[in-house]
Image (spheres, rainbow, N blue to C red):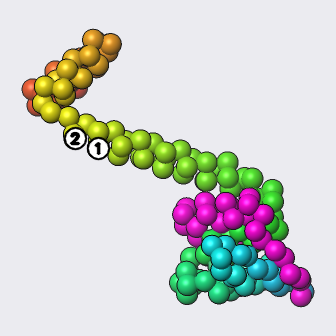
Amino acid sequence: MLFTNRKNLKQGYEIYKSGKVKILGYKGNVVTAEIIDDNTTYSITLNLKTKKKSCTCADSLDKRTTCKHVVALYFEIYQAEAKNCYDYYIKPYEEYLDKRHLRLALIDKLSKLDRADLIDLIYSLLEQSNQDTVDELFYKLDNKSNEIEI
Ligand SMILES: [Zn+2]
């Protein structure tokens, strides 16, 4: 079992997909590989049985989290696992990052509008909205909850 975070998982997957993982050889259960990324060569070993790992990058000084290079090597060896990880963890994470990026860009644009333009924008959105959205906005502006307890 290897433990890593979503960022290393995503970046490791990208390194694996780009074909940068070069397996140098096997010695028993230990795989030796190198990855050339951003003009730097990283040397990696991974014991497939014990999952003991090493990498020459700075991130691998943190022993708890598996660095992106070891993740890339792991995916190179277990390609079906790479596909599963992509579907279950990486793709949803990418979608989350895309949405977050879009929201931040939108907030940035909205913050640059003056009051009259904001009102025009809200008005045009309300024209296209259903009654529930209009009701919700009305209650929010009145600081009331639109949930009714019966
Ligand atoms: Zn590394």
Residue 13, numbered circle: none
**For this rendering, which residue is in front, 43 or 139?**
43
Q: Are marks 1 and 2 in contact (CB under 8 Å)?
A: yes
The residue positioned 42% from the left and 46% from the top of the image is 100
- Secondary structure of residue under mark 2: helix
Which quadrant is the C terminus positioned in? top left
Report how far apart the C-alphas of labels 1 and 2 lie in the structure.
5 Å
User: Taking 62 as reference, is 22 left or right?
Assistant: right
Q: Quadrant of ligand 1?
A: bottom right
Q: Residues within 10 Å of mark 2 (few under 14, many from 20)?
A: few
- Secondary structure of residue under mark 1: helix
Which quadrant is the N terminus positioned in? bottom right
Q: Is residue 148 visible?
A: no
Residue 111, numbered circle: 2
Q: Which residue is mark 1?
A: 108
> Does the numbered disc 2 mark a residue whose Cβ is under 8 Å from ligand 1?
no
Examine the rendered structure and indicate whether residue 16 appears above or below residue 116: below
The residue sitting at the left extreme is 142
Q: Which residues are magenta?
A: 1-27
Indicate the position of residue 143 as horizontal and vertical percent values. Answer: 11, 31
**Res. 134 image quadrant:** top left
Q: Is residue 14 magenta?
A: yes
**For this rendering, which residue is in front, 74 or 115?**
115
**Res. 105 image quadrant:** top left
The residue positioned 89% from the left and 82% from the top of the image is 25
Please give the count of numbered marks on the rendered protein: 2
Indicate the position of residue 46 as horizontal and vertical percent values. Answer: 76, 81
User: Taking 128 as reference, is 30 left or right?
Assistant: right
The residue sitting at the front extreme is 39
The amino acid at mark 1 is: Asp
Q: Residues within 10 Å of mark 1 (few under 14, many from 20)?
A: few
The amino acid at mark 2 is: Ser
